[in-house]
Image (cartoon, coloured by chain):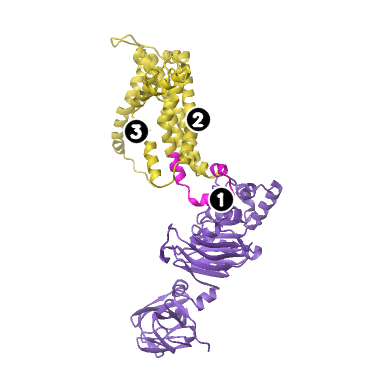
Amino acid sequence: MNKTVNHKAWFLVLPVLVLVAFSAVIPLMTVVNYSVQDTFGNNQFFWAGLEWFEEMLHDDRMWNALQRQLMFSGIILAIEVPLGIFVALNMPKSGLWASFCLVLMSLPLLIPWNVVGTIWQVFGRVDIGLLGHTLEALGIDYNYTQNTVAAWITIVVMDVWHWTSLVALLAYAGLKSIPDAYYQAAKIDQASRWKVFRYIELPKMAGVLMIAILLRFMDSFMIYTEPFVVTGGGPGNATTLLSIDLVKMALGQFDLGPAAAFSIMYFLVILLISWVFYTIMTNLDKKGM
Amino acid sequence: MAKITLDNLAHSYLANPASEDDYALKEMTHDWDDGGAYALLGSSGCGKSTLLNIISGLLQPSQGRILFDGKDVTHAPTAERNIAQVFQFPVVYDTMTVQENLAFPLRNRGRDEAYVASRVQEIARMIGMEDMLRKKARGLTADAKQKISLGRGMVRKDVNALLFDEPLTVIDPHMKWELRTQLKKLHHDFGHTMIYVTHDQTEALTFADKVVVMYDGRVVQIGTPEELFERPEHTFVGYFIGSPGMNVIPAKVEGRSAYVNGAQMALGHGYGALDGKVEIGVRPEFARLSQSDGLPIKVRRVEDAGRHKIIRAEFFGHGINIIAGEDDRISADMNRVSFDAAHVNVYRNDWRVKGDAA
């Protein structure tokens, strides 16, 4: 077969190229531009090469933030995924209550990040907050502005409150897609409740759970607004997650070079993790889950 | 293996059924013999799945009892009844291997591993899957999965009955035949009581010794395929079994004669005076088209079904079908039909009326 060569076809791709250039490539390139130069203001730039990257890689500051970030994402996943599955398993399967539960579950997902942060910031305050004041009255030392553990508990609980619904709703959708015959067969085979979960429900939910884990991981890995509103990264640097640290560096200290290098590495890490998840998911798909 | 007795059984999905129409399953009393192969045949919504679910214990009947070998199991949970069920869509445990699937019911009952292993081997041989034992169940074809669910049912030696709920729906036509033959052979070799739900008459007639025909929540006839063909007890059985189904024609019956629109025809038996809706039923196989014999008809069209011809005709305003042999010559001047008197059945209000002997 003879192929017709027609370079005019490139024009058809042009609109997409222009869009992507303006939305992604050009902004990213400005960051690359900052990351390889040094500036002292007045728009004077000096070539710095890979200096900023080297400096950042040898700086404990970024590693500590990354460590805190991984810890945060790990903790919220470890809580939200099992809790979400548990909630989904216990939700009514049909009827008015099912609709009611679905609406109730969706509510936290509709609240803007900033508002969630404010709600918990007030809720946890020792002087006027319901939670903070009650704990104080019970004699428990809880003050998220001074106590590292209290600060961590506050932002973790806040994230769990905000996002467990998402996992639960996805898991619920997965559960609803299981035909009744599976449960009937399990009864006939005398399978225990645990085995029904392990061999029927979990395999059938695996696909949506992977999506839930991916979404929650990416979102929590890039989280900024909520912990910033509640703790501002404190006490000290205890809750300074990657995004918060980045903003401090770029806008607080105006260290544009290091911040740009930091951004690019942050972006690469996210890209890498997304790729890993994507590979796992497509492999699962091939196996037919 | 067990004899299954339905004692005044009825079921309604409504909490307070007021009239008979509210019952999905009308009151019935039947014995299903130990080791019998039964087919439950009926169109969608006739209550056959309801009956099956009551036998397997997935549903509690609103009235009556169900007994296995004389023991009342009406309120016993599914697990205690020791029955096996194969569903419409293959149910296998995806993440397990074929072997683990087959062993699952035994392991759940705490049988020791040596027994489980030998039993799994035995069943794998029966269903012809010995060389697939180590494969994951997930990637298998639909018919292999159905075999696994069948095997999971048979792996327990004490199973009381094997229930099939339209098990061949998702199977390719050529595999259907093979699976049905295999089922028949398993029944022959091991003698399980088998109940097979289907709406496909071919499946029912080839699988079962006794076919139970259900219509509108009622069992209208239990019989061998031959009985269903020769003497349908209800006009529905006549319509539903046979291709095309029985011709049912309103008539007046007096003694040994039937009158259709005043035209007389002979019957094989004598009948007393009949009130209500009276009809005669005759299978297309027992109707004959000719130039001179019988009553006038208008032939609408002739279809060639391969081994025979089907003549669609109009008989005093009623559509009827006649089956003629593949080699019979059919000409335009053939416009009369005669019925084989011995095979004409008489129905009153849809139920067959027995004629006088001789």
Name the quadrant containing residue A109.
top left
Visual hue assigned to chain A: yellow
Q: Which mark is residue A78?
A: 2
The residue stretch that appears in magenta: A170-198
Q: Relative to B77, is A106 above or below?
A: above
Looking at the image, is B184 positioned above or below residue A171?
A: below
Quadrant housing residue B216: bottom left
Q: Position of residue A213 (x, y in %)?
A: 46, 33
Q: Amino acid at mark 1?
A: Lys
* Camera sees residue A185: yes
Q: Residues within 10 Å of mark 2 (few under 14, many from 20)?
A: few
Q: Which mark is residue A187?
A: 1
Q: Is A253 contained in the magenta span?
A: no
Give the mark nearest the N terminus, 2 or 3. Answer: 2
The extreme bottom residue here reads: B292
Q: Residue at x 56, y 70 (%)?
A: B210
The amino acid at mark 2 is Ala
For disc 3, the neighbor class at 10 Å (few under 14, some 14 to 19, many from 20) is few
Determine which of the numbered discs, if any, sits on residue A110 in the image.
3
